[in-house]
Amino acid sequence: MTARRLGRVFWIGAAAILVAAALVALVSVLRGEFSDTDGRILLTLGALLYTGGAALSGLALVDRGTQRALAWLVVAASPVCLGLVLWGVWSFAFDGGDEAAAKAAWSAVLALLAGLMASTALLLTHRRALVVLASAAGALAAVASTLTIVGVWAESGGDTFVKVVSALWILAALAYFLVPVLQRFTTAGAEDAVRVLGRLGDVELVATRRPLEGVAVEPPLRGERLLLRRRQTSSL
């Protein structure tokens, strides 16, 4: 199954989760109270959406054929994260029942967040020059999440430690959001360009982001559509 088909399955599932969450909220409103069970159901639905999105980003990275080790790590970590979060939610951990379960759940969320940032940053990158920035965003997020997890388990609340962790998260977020901004900036002037990839007689294969007459070829290449068209001759 390709990443595109998996994406469709995920978005259908995401829509179903949102509908289910809305129904839970409506029932709570009509009933006149928001019970602990309602909260756990909503947290479960949110965990499904979060881990499913992370798994999809990893599979999309696998489908692209780059950073396969990172991609498969994110895919493998997603169900583990889901299991730990559900353990924390349904073992009454967030009500002060099982402290270890709560810490494990938060650790899983933070660890997967680093993988999600790294994979999506790489997916947003279509230029090799920005791969370094996307990798830096993932690396900073990994270090920040690791230190945060250490703080969660060791209950370190020192002022210096908090400042260091906060600075790392800020730098990770900065690098992450710079990736799509710079990607857009570097391609802004070339979006209407038509690149000729090859010719055979009167037929040429072109890549473009704008509407163009021709026979579409699947799959798209880095956001561009591949088309077969008659060879264009310039008039003098």
Image (cartoon, grey):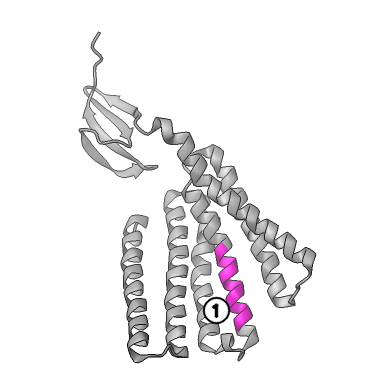
Q: Which residue is most to the top?
A: 236
233 within the magenta span: no
Give the quadrant of residue 117. bottom right
Q: Which residue is mark 1?
A: 84
**Residue positioned 60% across, 84% down in the render:** 101
In the image, residue 195 lies at what x, y percent? Answer: 35, 28
In the image, residue 186 lies at what x, y percent? Answer: 48, 35
**Residue positioned 43% across, 49% down in the render:** 64
104 within the magenta span: yes
Q: Count up the numbered dots.
A: 1
- Above or below — where is 216 with respect to 21? above
In the image, residue 168 lies at what x, y percent? Answer: 68, 57
Q: Nearer the viewer, residue 177 or 141?
A: 177
Q: Nearer the viewer, residue 95 or 193?
A: 95
Quarter in which the N terminus is drawn = bottom left
Q: Hey, what amino acid is under mark 1?
A: Leu
Left or right: residue 131 compared with residue 60: right
Please report the bounds of the magenta region as a residue range.
Answer: 102-113
Q: Which residue is most to the front?
A: 32
- Above or below — where is 161 with respect to 204? below
**Residue positioned 79% across, 63% down in the render:** 160
Q: Main secondary structure of the magenta part?
A: helix
